[in-house]
Image: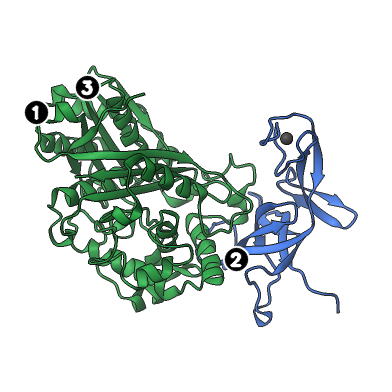
């Protein structure tokens, strides 16, 4: 499986998760990782694995959009509990369940996003509706 | 620093549209000649020039270095300092700000600002690759385009405040109606709410008519300190406030507002000593229909969450509280990146001179121009506001 944008996420025991940084001086969490803490300019930083679930702040169903994605596709902002907002493709929505909708719970998933110049599938993070088990 | 009173003495603009047969140099020369003639000043009196040219669209074909010098040489303006600026869709306003500040500070007495773009030269595919290779979050990979930003905003406004698709369409109907009166507009064709809602879907809920087009064109303005201007005009337009901000890029504000716009508006009202209730007319950055509704709120034209009703009840239309985008806005003119900010000022100067013809707001005395540009992570990168007074 060929991954893309691997600076943004990593494997964990529960599945993939986005990776940012936490400042050991002021506690600021930032994403993606940066050279300094954007709050206090400190350089004493640790890797911070972000929550795998969040809420869909807003979204759009795109008909004419980015050429590397097959239309229609859904893109949206996901709010994570660490107060990080991340743009993501939203997958696995069921219109009969009124998905997607503003403020619905979502979880991260590894999925095929696009193809490279040789036609090989590239996998990246996406978010999908978080459904209660059973 | 004590800033001098700076006034706009001359304005010029080309028709916005497809000018495939013309060079960018010729388009720029036309607007600059117009502004200099309108000012009634000798071109040899222009002491410096700042040109707005974002150039993004020409990138794949090779950028034009020192475009201001090349354009100005064609009309005999040589030897003086010249600058080129880029700030995305706010590029024109940043050139205008540079000229305003250099005159306000006393460095020069007479300056020329112009904005230009020729966007019908590059193919769309080559442009897309340029958008976000430098953005750490890789937003373009995740499907971000210009319309998707405002489609996401529209969906949040609809969920949070009950904004309707009809209200989005009403922005387009109003601006397109104004656009039919503007001979410089690229799309001077009126539309109905039904036509807007039934147009091709781009990114739900935005249809084609809710998205501005691109094009070729230029706009220019001659600025002077008020004392020097007395030799040239009895009808100057004063720059009562000029503000430029960059984005906050909040992860927490609801995606119905841009903090940079809110901050810029507060600074501009304070600098001009006026409030939104004093405004007669405004040109605001309607790149997409929901943007105009957002701006009503961020600029204080109405309360938070009331932007949809503000357009629906006609408060931004002729006869309303603040008449917005009498030029037809970007939705009628097309968004000629580098030219847009100065084109907005062109319309407002005409309003304050009382020569806007069928779109004239009776007795207009105070005007606001708002131009925002660029985007990274939840917000515009630049916001420029000018408040102009008769
Ligand atoms: Zn810190």
Residue at 88%, 58% (x, y): give it.
A14
Kindly identify which chain the residue marked by label 3 belongs to: B
* Label 3 in the same subunit as label 2: no
Q: Which chain did the image draw in blue? A: A
Q: Colour of chain B?
A: green
Percent position of residue B183, x then y: 17, 56
Percent position of residue A29, x then y: 74, 43
Image-based side of B253 in relation to B20, left or right:
right
Residue furthest toward the right?
A13
Q: Quadrant of residue B301?
A: bottom left
Of the two numbered discs 3 and 1 in the rendering, the one whose residue sits closer to the viewer: 1
The residue indicated by pointer 3 is B47
The residue indicated by pointer 1 is B231
Label 2 element class: strand
Disc 3 C-beta below 8 A from ligand 1: no
Relative to B105, residue B384 above or below: below
């Amino acid at each position: 499986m060929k991954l893309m944008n691997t600076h943004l996420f990593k494997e964990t025991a529960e599945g993939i998760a986005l990776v940012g940084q936490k400042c050991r001086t002021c506690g600021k969490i930032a994403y993606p990782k940066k050279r300094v803490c954007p709050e206090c300019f400190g350089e004493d930083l640790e890797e911070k694995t972000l929550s795998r679930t969040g809420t869909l702040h807003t979204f759009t169903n795109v008909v004419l959009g980015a050429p590397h994605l097959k239309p229609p596709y859904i893109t949206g902002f996901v709010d994570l509990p660490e107060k990080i907002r991340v743009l993501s493709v939203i997958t696995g929505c069921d219109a009969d369940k009124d998905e997607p909708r503003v403020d619905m719970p979502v979880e991260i998933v590894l999925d095929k996003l696009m193809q490279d110049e040789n036609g090989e599938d590239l996998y990246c993070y996406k978010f999908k509706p978080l459904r209660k088990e059973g | 620093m004590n800033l001098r009173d700076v006034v706009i003495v001359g304005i010029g603009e080309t028709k916005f549209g497809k000018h495939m047969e013309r060079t960018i140099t010729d388009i720029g020369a036309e607007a600059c000649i117009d502004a200099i003639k309108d000012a009634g000043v000798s071109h040899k009196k222009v002491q410096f020039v700042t040109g707005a040219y974002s150039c993004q669209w020409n990138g794949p074909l090779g950028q034009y270095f020192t475009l201001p010098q090349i354009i100005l040489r064609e009309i005999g303006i040589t030897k003086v300092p010249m600058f080129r600026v880029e700030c995305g869709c706010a590029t024109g306003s940043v050139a205008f700000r540079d000229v305003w500040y250099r005159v306000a500070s006393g460095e020069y007495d007479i300056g020329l600002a112009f904005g230009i773009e020729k966007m019908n030269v590059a193919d769309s595919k080559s442009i897309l690759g340029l958008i976000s290779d430098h953005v750490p979050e890789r937003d373009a990979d995740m499907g971000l385009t210009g319309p998707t930003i405002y489609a996401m905003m529209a969906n949040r406004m609809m969920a949070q405040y009950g904004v309707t698709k009809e209200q989005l369409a009403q922005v387009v109907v109003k601006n397109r109606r104004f656009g039919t009166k503007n001979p410089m507009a690229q799309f001077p064709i009126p539309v109905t709410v039904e036509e807007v809602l039934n147009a091709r879907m781009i990114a739900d809920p935005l249809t084609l008519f809710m998205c501005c087009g691109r094009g070729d064109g230029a706009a220019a303005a001659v600025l002077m300190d008020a004392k020097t201007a007395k030799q040239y005009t009895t009808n100057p337009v004063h720059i009562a406030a000029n503000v430029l901000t960059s984005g906050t890029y909040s992860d927490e504000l609801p995606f119905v507002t841009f903090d940079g716009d809110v901050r810029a508006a507060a600074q501009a009202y304070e600098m001009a000593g006026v409030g939104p209730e004093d405004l007669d007319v405004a040109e605001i950055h309607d790149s997409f229909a929901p943007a105009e509704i957002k701006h009503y709120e961020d600029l204080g034209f109405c309360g938070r969450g009331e932007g949809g009703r503000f357009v629906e009840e006609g408060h931004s239309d002729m006869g309303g509280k603040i008449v917005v985008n009498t030029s037809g806005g970007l939705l009628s003119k097309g968004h000629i990146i580098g030219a847009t900010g100065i084109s907005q000022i062109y319309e407002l100067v005409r309003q304050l001179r009382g020569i806007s013809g069928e779109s004239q707001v009776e007795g207009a005395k105070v005007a606001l121009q708002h131009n925002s540009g660029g985007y990274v992570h939840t917000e515009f990168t630049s916001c420029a506001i000018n408040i102009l007074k008769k």
